[in-house]
Amino acid sequence: MHWLGWIRFFEAAARHQSFMRAADELHLTHGAVSRQIRQLEDALGVALFERRNRAVFLTEAGHILHAAASQSLELLAGAADRIRAQGRQQALVLSCEPTIAMRWLIPRLPRFAEAHPDIALHLMAAGGPLDFARGGVDLALRRNDFPFGPQLHAQEVAEEWVGVVCRAGTTGLATLPRLHTRSRPQAWQRWAQAAGVRQRFGADAWYEHFYLTIQAAAAGLGCAIASRLMVADEMADGRLAAPFGFVRDGSSYHLLSPVAFERDERRRAVRDWLCREARASLDAQPSGVTAPAPSPRARGEAPRARRGRAARATRGADI
C-alpha cells in the first residue's frame, strides 16, 4: 500500500503543525513535503490539513490519523530498540587455537568479564582456517601460519617468541629427554635454527598434543619447546625455567574478523583487551635468558658453537 510510505511526511507535518518545519526535519523542500501529503490525501479521499494562508491545521480526519501514526512509530522505535539490545546481549563467539586457549586465554577471561560485563564471550577451541559463517564464529585468534585472505580483517595481537622450557631448578640438560609433539614435529629444529644454539639432550619422547609436552616439562619429564605466551604464568610463578631464553620465530598471533573492527564496538573491545593482555604477558618476563644458563661443558656444546649465538628469526615456524 503506497500510502504507508507517505506517513512519515504526514507525521512530521502534523507534529510541527507546519510543512516548513517538517521539511527542515526531513531535509527536504517545502514543496516536496506538500506534494507527499497531497498524494496521501488523494489516496485516502479526505483532507488531512486545513490550509489557511501560510498556516496548516489538522482536520478531524487528520487528528485521527496522527494519533494512529504516532502510536505506530512509537511501536516501531520500541521494536528497533529491543532488536538492538538483543544484538548487544548475544554472545560473541571467539575461536582460539586449543593450547593457547587452555594455557593463556581462559585464565584471563575473568578479567575480560570484569572489564566488560555487558559483552558475553563464548570460546570455541579450534585451529587453522575456518568458515566464519558456517561455523557460527565472530572472531578467531590464529597464528599466521596460513594465508588469512583479503576478505578478513586482521589485527596483530602479539609476536610469537619460542624457547626451551623445563622444570625450574633442573640441571644436566644433556641427559634430559626432548619432548616432541606429533602435531608440530619440526618444533625443535626450527627453534635451533632461530636461536642458533647447539645443545645435546637425552632421548626423544613423543606426545600427541603440544599442551601435553608443556605439562610434561613442568612435571620434570624433560625439556619442551614452548611459546612464551603459553608458559607466561608458569614462568611468572617459578614453575618453569627457560635456560636459553626466548627468540622471535617470525610468526605472530592475529585476531581475525569478517567484519571491520571499527563497525562493531564489541569486536573492538575484544581486540583491544587481547592486545593489552598479550603485551602484559610478554612484558612480564625478559625476552632473554630467564634462568641461569648451563656452562658450555654442561651443555655439551662445541667451542665454535659458542660464538655468534645471536637469535635469527625465521618466518612461519610451527610452534
Image (tube, helix red, strand yellow):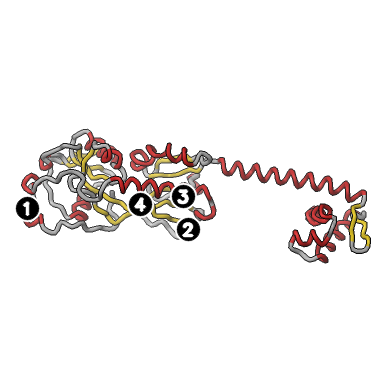
Which residue is under mark 2?
A: 151
Above or below, 168 relative to 147: above
> Is residue 302 left or right of 139 when viewed as pictured?
left
Observer-side mark, 4 or 3, equals 4
Chain-order first, disc 2 or disc 1 = 2
Q: Name the secondary structure under disc 2.
A: loop
Chain-order first, disc 4 or disc 2 = 2
Q: Quadrant of residue 10?
A: bottom right
Chain-order first, disc 1 or disc 4 = 4
| Residue that appears at 49% across and 54% down | 261
Which residue is under mark 1?
A: 302
Which residue is under mark 4?
A: 158
Mark 1 surroundings within 10 Å by alpha-carbon count, few (fewer than 14), some (14 through 19), many (20 or more): few
Q: Residue 189, can we see it? A: yes
Q: Name the secondary structure under disc 3.
A: loop
Query: Residue 262 location in percent, x, y?
Result: 52, 55
Confirm or deny contact between disc 4 and disc 2 (CB under 8 A).
Answer: no
Q: Nearer the viewer, residue 187 or 217?
A: 217
| Residue that appears at 79% across and 66% down | 29
Q: Name the secondary structure under disc 4.
A: strand
Which residue is under mark 3?
A: 131
Above or below, 156 relative to 230: below
Query: Residue 237 location in percent, x, y?
Result: 27, 37
Mark 4 surroundings within 10 Å by alpha-carbon count, few (fewer than 14), some (14 through 19), many (20 or more): many
Chain-order first, disc 3 or disc 1 = 3
Identified by mark 4, the residue type is Ala
Mark 3 surroundings within 10 Å by alpha-carbon count, few (fewer than 14), some (14 through 19), many (20 or more): few
Q: Name the secondary structure under disc 1.
A: loop
